[in-house]
Image (cartoon, helix red, strand yellow):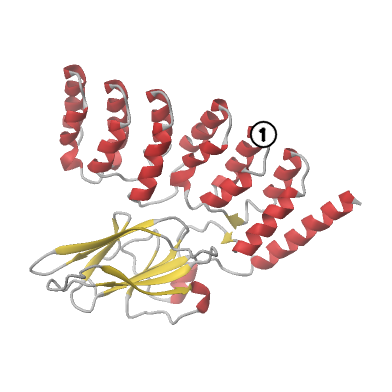
Amino acid sequence: MLKKSYLIAIFLFCFSLAYSQNRIGSGGNVTIFSDRDPFYLFINGIQYNNQPSKQVRVEQLKDHLYDLQVEFVGRVKSSLSRKGVSILNEDGEFLDLTYLANNIRSNRMRSLTLYAMFPTDNHLPDPRAAQVFAYGRPKQIVDSESEYEYGHETYYGDEMTASEFNAFLKTIDQGGFDNDKLKIASMSTSQVSFSLNQVKDVLKRFSWDEGKLAFAKMAYANCPEKRNYMLLTDQFSFGDSKNKLLDFIKNQPIDSEYLERMSEVELNSLIKLMSQSGFDEDKLKILTTVSGKVAFPVASIRRILKELSWDQGKLSAAQKLYPNCLDKRNYATLLDEFTFLDYKNKFTAFVRNQK
């Protein structure tokens, strides 16, 4: 009887999952407009519009946090920013957000202000008067809805709704042992996009690190938050399992043409994870998982170097992070993070030899 109920549960979940595949998971959207001055829009340090505009829209944002910044053009240049913007509501639904960029200098409320917020399922009119971009494709204006739907953006699979994901977890719980749970979970990994938090929730269903590691590897390909994947190490009990996951992440290819700047929230999570590791060798292993996949300004690299105890580790980190530094012209200012003259000289020689 128990086996029959188990099989029925799997069948019902597969049916609901197959039904959900008819929907296209488009993610969330952000529109920023100004009633005064044109601007350039940056998301996580990446500039999206080549030409200044009074209205810019970016679509297909996934469920991690974003730092928004507008740079106004004109005789007096200025900028506004908003950090840690979430594209999800409390129910896990994607949102369509609109911000007003208020650049009136005499106004004390000069800010990037939330103007409107709706679930994307409301099917609001598409504001084609704006310059429209697909997330991950900066400086490539979307000219039509057909190009938007069938363009070359990275597709990770459909997102589950909150109710679908809860049904998925309940189905996994029907498996008695980790091996059974892994078989159930593996049915959807090639078809569904899992957020980092969803992967965490699934890992908590497994009793042993072996099953957790197997699922984490399966879910990696369709996770749009690969750059934060190393944060999953806190779900493992043993150091060997954590190292195996970090080695796996390090060896995965970069899947984006554009390297995004890591947001402040994500940077804080990375530094917290490094601080929880005892030795510089362990901290560098964590850093290696993101060093080639995320862009950093010098200010962020300085914070990372401060987490390392010895000059040797700091030099290794500085060398790893240099290629994707957003402001290499300021890299020399990191010299004061080194204690000993020998490593100061090695760092100076490294920077001077870069083209």
Regarding residue 259, the answer to whether it shows in the image is no
Regarding residue 139, the answer to whether it shows in the image is yes
Q: Is residue 164 above or below residue 333?
A: below
Q: Quadrant of residue 318?
A: top left
Q: Nearer the viewer, residue 11 or 201?
A: 201
Q: Quadrant of residue 50?
A: bottom left
Horizontally, residue 45 falls left or right of residue 266, namely left
Q: Nearer the viewer, residue 142 or 87?
A: 87
In the rendered view of the protein, which quadrant contains the C terminus?
top left
What percent of the width, then of the height, locates residue 93? 53, 66
Q: Is residue 273 above or below residue 193?
A: above
**Residue depicted at 39% across the width and 47% down the height:** 266
Name the outermost residue toward the left: 75
**Of the residues shown, which amino acid type is indicated by label 1?**
Trp
Q: Which residue is mark 1?
A: 208
Mark 1 neighbour density, 10 Å: few (under 14) some (14–19) many (20 or more): some
Q: Is residue 270 above or below residue 247?
A: below
Secondary structure of residue under mark 1: loop
Name the outermost residue toward the front: 108
**Residue depicted at 53% across the width and 53% down the height:** 195
**Residue depicted at 62% across the width and 56% down the height:** 191
What percent of the width, then of the height, locates residue 81? 26, 61
What percent of the width, then of the height, locates residue 347? 20, 26
What percent of the width, then of the height, locates residue 219? 58, 47
Q: Nearer the viewer, residue 349 or 78?
A: 78
Query: How many numbered circles are shown?
Result: 1
Horizontally, residue 154 falls left or right of residue 101, namely right
Horizontally, residue 144 falls left or right of residue 15, namely left
Name the outermost residue toward the right: 1
Q: Nearer the viewer, residue 291 or 85?
A: 85
